[in-house]
Amino acid sequence: MNRRRVAVVAAIVCVGFVVTLFVVWGSAGPKPVPTRPACLIGSERPCSENVAEGKAYRYQVPHCGLIWIVDFDGSHWDVDKGTMNDDENQRFGINSDQGTMTLEGKDLAVYRSFGGGDAALHRHSGPLKPFLCA
């Protein structure tokens, strides 16, 4: 009977922990990552919401990485490839990744990978010229 109580208490604690994580994770504020399918396929207009400066937001790098189309803070962004080493370029420059994106200034954002490493991005100006990504 004691083992059963311990198992029940452990299960309740685990469920509570998971629920707490989801509540905290879901309360991150605006959705800086586009949610409409057309936006994920390279929409000419950004779909993300504006974000608060200095706050880190969860960010899912698209399939083709940061060198493709980055939609954040209601704008498209261009990665500064000089801020990534070869490993970072392989992990999130040209591939999908998860991390946070922080608006550091009007025209500067920083992506930080959960796997380590970061990259600076600058607000895109002019017409967007997406390229085919396979």
Image (spheres, rainbow, N blue to C red):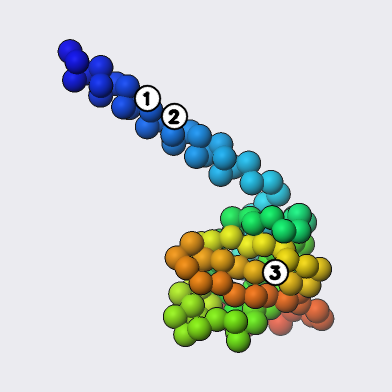
Asked which secondary structure carries label 3, the reply is: strand
Total marks shown come to 3
Tag 1: residue type? Ile
Residue 57 in the image: above or below residue 127: above
> Measuring 37% from the left and 24% from the top, which residue is drawn there?
12
Mark 1 and mark 2: Cα distance apart in space = 6 Å
Residue matched to label 3:
109
**In the displayed structure image, the side of residue 96 where residue 71 appears, left or right:** right
Residue at 31% from the left image edge and 27% from the top image edge: 10
* Pointer 2 local density, CA inside 10 Å: few below 14, some 14–19, many at least 20: few
Q: Determine which quarter of the picture holds residue 120.
A: bottom right
> Contact, CB < 8 Å: mark 1 with mark 2?
yes
Residue at point 25%, 24% (across, down): 7
Are dots 3 and 1 in contact, CB under 8 Å? no
Q: Which mark is residue 56?
A: none
Residue 68, percent from left and from top:
61, 77
Along the viewing direction, whichever of 86 and 70 lies nearer the viewer? 86
Describe the element under mark 1 as helix, strand or loop: helix
Query: Spatial distance from mark 3 to mark 1, Cα to Cα?
Result: 40 Å
Spot occupied by residue 98 in the image (x, y as percentages of width and height): 51, 62
Residue situated in front as seen by the camera: 99 or 33? 99
What mark, if any, has residue 16 been given in the picture?
A: 2
In the depicted structure, whether residue 41 falls above or below residue 16: below
Mark 1, other Cα within 10 Å: few <14 / some 14–19 / many ≥20? few
Kind of residue at disc 3:
Ala
Mark 3 and 2 residues: CB-CB less than 8 Å, in contact? Answer: no
Secondary structure at badge 2 equals helix
Residue 68 seen anywhere in this rendered image of the structure: no
Which numbered tag is attached to residue 12? 1
